[in-house]
Image (cartoon, helix red, strand yellow):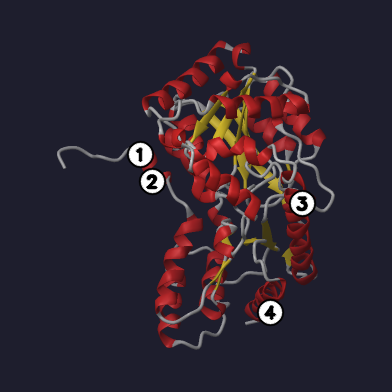
Amino acid sequence: MRQRLLSDGAKELSYEIREIVKKADKLSKLGKKIHWENIGDPIAKNAKLPEWMKEIIADTVHQDDTYSYCPSKGVLETREFLADLNNKRGGAQISADDILFFNGTGDAIGKVYQYLRHESRIIGPSPAYSTHSSAEAAHANAQPITYKLDPNNHWYPDLEDLYLKVKYNPNIVGILVINPDNPTGVVYPLDVLKRIVAIAREFNLFIISDEIYINITYNGARAYSLAEVIEEVPGIAMKGISKEFPWPGSRCGWMEYYNKNKDPEFARLCSAIDNAKMIEVSATKLPQMVIPKIMGDSRYMPYRKALNETIGRRSSIVSEILGTVKELTFNPTYGAFYNTIIFRDGVLKPHQKLNIDNPEIKTLVEGWVAEDDVLLDKRFVYYLLGATGICVVPISSFSSDLKGFRVTLLEEDENELRRIFTAIKDSINIYLNS
């Protein structure tokens, strides 16, 4: 090429949740049955939308106006419904004009970071969700800036770490919260959220709250939305239906702006994001049209409550199996449908392995672990994949210095869930003693 094409930040765009799939696909072609514990797609794990929900969608498909352009900000009736839903909870009040639809929250994430100055940084949690950390790092041409989630304290944020990093890095303009969290499954306590708001207020920052799992809590937890705690601080909440209905193929997410006009710089950012969507002419329409019909249906919250209880039961099964392994730091989960399990310091060694019967698969895995820069948790994940076909994600790939792995809580068959996690437990014991 006449000139270099890629920006320096392009190297920061990675998504290990999908990268491990490439390796698993190679093993699948060699006859290995893969158990996909790497990605949070309930439909891929055999979840079914209830028939009443499908009927609403089918009826809407037969409406002629479903096929026209959608207003760039989103269907007005849907935005009015969502604004009313927010306002009834109390806290920051919004109007339909404060809501903007996207082709999934991934699209929303990309837009926020795209229009920030390169020098302006958003500090986010670590372990980090890759879509946020990669997009933020790519826009800044630098490594992501993170605050610690502490596995020795229920995965709660280390607020001193957050405070000091904000205080001594004037380029930080915003704080990212993912609540409930992916990948750890932690639900931020109310007092923690209030402290984060206080830090934002003290240093004149805005807050981004990824709330895609806001209505997926269990085991007695309750997730507080950003609107309920933000007071006068500017902020953006990101929401969607991909995990909650669940309808990941809808690619339908939205932002809610809070206190948009309390700060002129924040107002300009919101306006730039709005204008970027105007250029795209239209947002996805069908899923927007069904949101008020489904979420406003009297059957919706009982459906969601029952499904949350099911996820909570799966969480308890995983706790029962892995919670007693002394070489692990294990925390029960209370939100979303993931769990992040950490190996205690010093238990992973570079010589450890699992037996792999298939010689072709063994050769592949040994090639992967022989790479000079392979981290110890990746080494375990690769051997687990080769020996058992269980596909999990190494936690070092979530912008973290910790060593462990993330699993999902999506297996519909609880007998199969027990079998898979018992196999993980047995593999850990064999691997650590090899």
Q: Name the quadrant of the C terminus.
A: bottom right
> Closer to the camera, 45 or 181?
45
Residue under label 4: 426
Residue under label 2: 11
Can you tell which mark lies on residue 269?
none
Q: SS of the residue at dot 2? A: helix
Q: Residue at x 74, y 36 (%)?
A: 159
Quarter-of-image position of residue 433: bottom right
In this view, the mark in front (2 or 3): 3
In this view, the mark in front (4 or 3): 3
Instruction: Say whether residue 246 is visible.
Output: no
Tag 4 or tag 1, which sits nearer the N-term?
A: 1
Residue under label 1: 8
Q: Amino acid at mark 3?
A: Tyr
In this view, the mark in front (1 or 3): 3
Q: SS of the residue at dot 4? A: helix
Q: Are marks 1 and 2 in contact (CB under 8 Å)?
A: yes
Q: SS of the residue at dot 1? A: helix
Give the alpha-carbon distance from disc 2 to disc 4, as whole Å. Answer: 37 Å
Q: Amino acid at mark 4?
A: Asp
Q: Name the quadrant of the N terminus.
A: top left
Residue under label 3: 334
